[in-house]
Amino acid sequence: MNGTLVFALLFWIFAWGLNAWLVKQRPKNLALARLIGIAVPVLFGITLLVIWECVVRGFAIPTILLPPPSMIGARILSSTPILWADFQQTFLKSVITGYVAGCGLGFVVAILIDRSPFLQKGLLPIGNFVSALPVVGVAPIMVMWFGFDWPSKVAVVVIMTFFPMLVNTVQGLSASSHMERDLMRTYAAGWGQTLVKLRLPAAWPFIFNALKINSTLALIGAIVAEFFGTPIVGMGFRISTEVGRSNVDMVWAEIAVAAVAGSVFYGLVALGERAVTFWHPSVRGGRA
Amino acid sequence: MTSLFRDRILPVLTVIAAILVLWHVAVVYLNAPFVRDQAARAGETVTLSQLVERSFAQERPVLPAPHQILAELWDTTVNKAVTSKRSLVYHAWVTLSATLAGFGMGTVLGIALAIGIVHSRAMDRSLMPWVIASQTIPILAIAPMIIVVLNSIGISGLMPKALISTYLSFFPIVVGMVKGLRSPDVLLIDLMHTYHASPAQTFWKLRWPASMPYLFTSLKVAIAISLVGAIVGELPTGAVAGLGARLLSGSYYGQTIQIWAALFMAAGLAAVLVSIVGFAHHRVLKRMGVKP
């Protein structure tokens, strides 16, 4: 056992002890409690990085298999322009456009079939079924139809995000109880008023559930679609070519960007959920 | 019986029929330019009926007609020997074995993590955010990496794909099982306390049975997603075997019918797997005395 490994072990024990101690604290101060809530997972993450770095150095693992975090960090700093171009191509163009279009389409169709129970009964089982299918498989077909550039990725993302949104919105629209709907009737509220004032608010938790699921699906769809053909820019393209050229640190840098982008995206949706469904028990209780 | 037909079967059949009609219209619309182009080259004019007929029978259509896909499926499953590399059954089996291996490992890992999270506060607070964060990393982006790295240390074939499936499938199980293991009422846990039950007894007699509905709901999601993982895991291996490889080679050579047949096979596989889990769900809940 050499020095770095011993250090990793000591650091791990220390961090674990600190975390165990932090978890037991019950501060009266609300801000302090929130700080601890953030500090615990952050400490865990730092521990992981330190152990990773030390294990790679301690066991002298070839960097081609697993580069240490410091090397990945240096790579991110040194090739920011490439990473930014890939990010623009994959995330800003494909993912965001497809996500908005797919979720919007699912929502609109759900509202349209809302007045026809027959269509709902027909579409729901099929929507549920399609949600369980490996929809990413349509990627090669979309690349053939819409070309190599970002429109084909948008098409894949739209197809992947449409059905979860449709199913969840339809379920959410029927979430309000009979009593509440009867109350709206006694107020002589029309279909539109009932929709806006009662049924949409009741549906928000379901809709946000779909938005969260779709935020990760969209990124996956766009990246996988790039494996089937792409111009010479994009995260999926960069990953598959740099693996071929054994530039593993570049691949990991791309993965780090994807992870941060995905987390921020998810976090934004979750923040939106907190703002819109502030009345829901799961938010009021302080546990989202 | 009639109400079952009216409320469930009829609407679904109507929608499917509508999709098929739209599909056929789309086939003519999308394939017609090629037919017209060919006719113009040959110097002949096509009538409408010829146009329709030819757009349904192209070698490499933009959108194949359903009967072409069915014919391809029949040809590659029944008419080829199962061991042949041209048999779709062979490719489906390759994908299925990776799916099941990954699903099994993901289930075990997910349940183990959930038990840890439920029983240790430190694990709950430090691990749970990272379990969630791990899913925002698009694993499918890492798939080529994992396969290349594992290949270079001598692990190849089934395992790398199964690991990708594991990574994708453990998450829904952790989330579902944490919820399920915590689902017993405080009153019930207090009751176990008054019986002087040990943590192990509380677990086996109360928490574990209470978590079953949650487990099966998660299992359905997990098996669907591990199939996706296995298919995508086959893409970067350079199209050796499996449904993903069929998709990739189909897209290289412009064999649209082959792509669609592989897609239909994958869809069928997903449907069978999910319904097996659904059947197990039904049986277990029935044995536990839950009224349907």
Image (tube, helix red, strand yellow):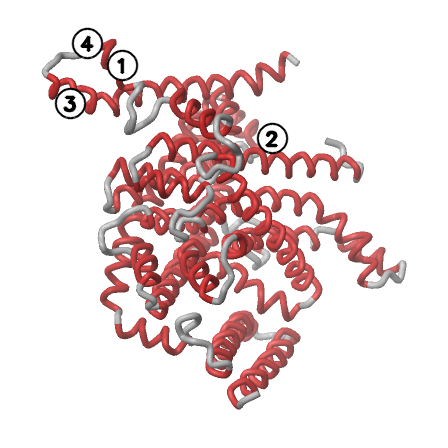
Viewer can see residue A173: no
- In this rendering, the answer to whether B44 lies above or below A7 is above
> Which mark's residue is nearer the viewer, 2 or 1?
1
**Label 4 near label 1: C-beta < 8 Å?**
no
Quadrant assignment, res A141: top left
Give the x, y percent position of residue B177. 65, 52
Query: Residue placed farthest to the right in the image?
Result: B195
> Which mark's residue is nearer the viewer, 4 or 2?
4
Q: Chain of mark 4?
A: B
Counting residues from the N terminus, which is met first, the one under dot 3 or under dot 4? 3
Q: Give the CA distance from mark 2 to mark 3.
A: 62 Å
- In this rendering, the answer to whether A90 lies above or below A59 is above
Residue pointed to by mark 3: B37
Q: Amino acid at mark 1?
A: Val
For the residues beneath circles 3 and 1, the answer to whether they share a chain is: yes
Q: Give the CA distance from mark 3 to mark 4.
A: 14 Å
Residues A286 and B1: in front is B1
**Label 4 near label 3: C-beta < 8 Å?**
no
Query: Residue placed farthest to the bottom in the image?
Result: A3
Where disc 4 sits, the SS reads loop
Residue A137 in the figure: left or right of residue B116: left
Residue pointed to by mark 4: B47
Query: What label sits on residue A179 in the rendered view?
Result: 2
| Residue displayed at 40% across by 49% down | B235
Give the x, y percent position of residue B104. 63, 51
